[in-house]
Amino acid sequence: MKSNSFLLIYIPLSNFERLIQLADEVFAVKSDSHQLSVNPQVMERLKKMHPSTISEFDEGNGPVAWVLLIPTTYEIMNRFINAEITEKELYELTPLGIKYDALYLCSALVLEEYRRKGIVKKLVLNAIETIRMEHPLKAIFVWPFTKEGDFKAKSIAKLTSLPLYKRQ
């Protein structure tokens, strides 16, 4: 008699895979063409804007937190805040090789078991401090997707003494 049984083996996702899954759940980028979909080309261009645009925290088993910031101009920030342009257009319209005066707090992702430990705050504050060494930032802005993200943006604004603008 033949047996049609098979064995299922559970292989846990890596931290990297979990962060990708979290990004899909929170931001739903794949179903919203107006949002910036981060790929190697986007990451390369962001690093040209400033090396601190992408930060991660890794305890040795892969990243447990990511932060993505987009430096831009005050004018482009206002167009985004007023919903005249999309997030993707904000990225595309931001020129390379200029002095940026606004910073978009684009995204922050933290695996659940690492939340409320100050990881994102430290990553963002370090990035802002480094970016400010080369760019005269006048404002930060955000498009909050979660209550936690909104709260964190307010905290960052207070700690950096930069005004916070929000897209609704």
Image: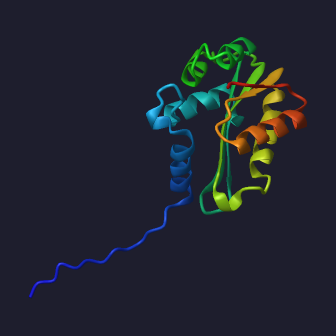
Question: Where is residue 128 shown, x and y percent of the image?
Answer: 80, 34
Residue 4 makes an appearance in the image: yes
Q: Quadrant of residue 161?
A: top right
Display coloring: rainbow
36 relative to 56, above or below: above
Q: Nearer the viewer, residue 47 or 93?
A: 93
The extreme left residue here reads 1
Q: Residue at x 75, y 19 (%)?
A: 100
Q: Quarter of the image for the N terminus: give it.
A: bottom left
Res 135 → quadrant: top right
In this picture, is 11 found above or below 21? below
Q: Position of residue 37 (x, y in %)?
A: 51, 33
In x, y percent, where is residue 11? 44, 69
**Where the C terminus falls, by quadrant?**
top right
Q: Is residue 22 left or right of residue 60?
A: left
Is 9 rendered above or below residue 113? below
* Closer to us: 60 or 37: 37
Question: Which residue appears at 50% of the width and 54% of the height?
Answer: 17
Of the pair 119 and 143, the residue shown nearer to us = 143
Residue 59 visible in the snapshot? no
In the image, is 22 to the left or to the right of 132? left
**Figure disc tally:** 0
* The residue positioned farthest toward the bottom in the image shown: 1
Q: Residue at x 65, y 58 (%)?
A: 112
Q: Is residue 157 left or right of residue 60?
A: right
Q: Is residue 115 left or right of residue 22?
A: right
Whole-percent x, y for residue 145 in the image: 64, 37
Q: What residue is drawn where x is 34% and y is 74%? A: 8
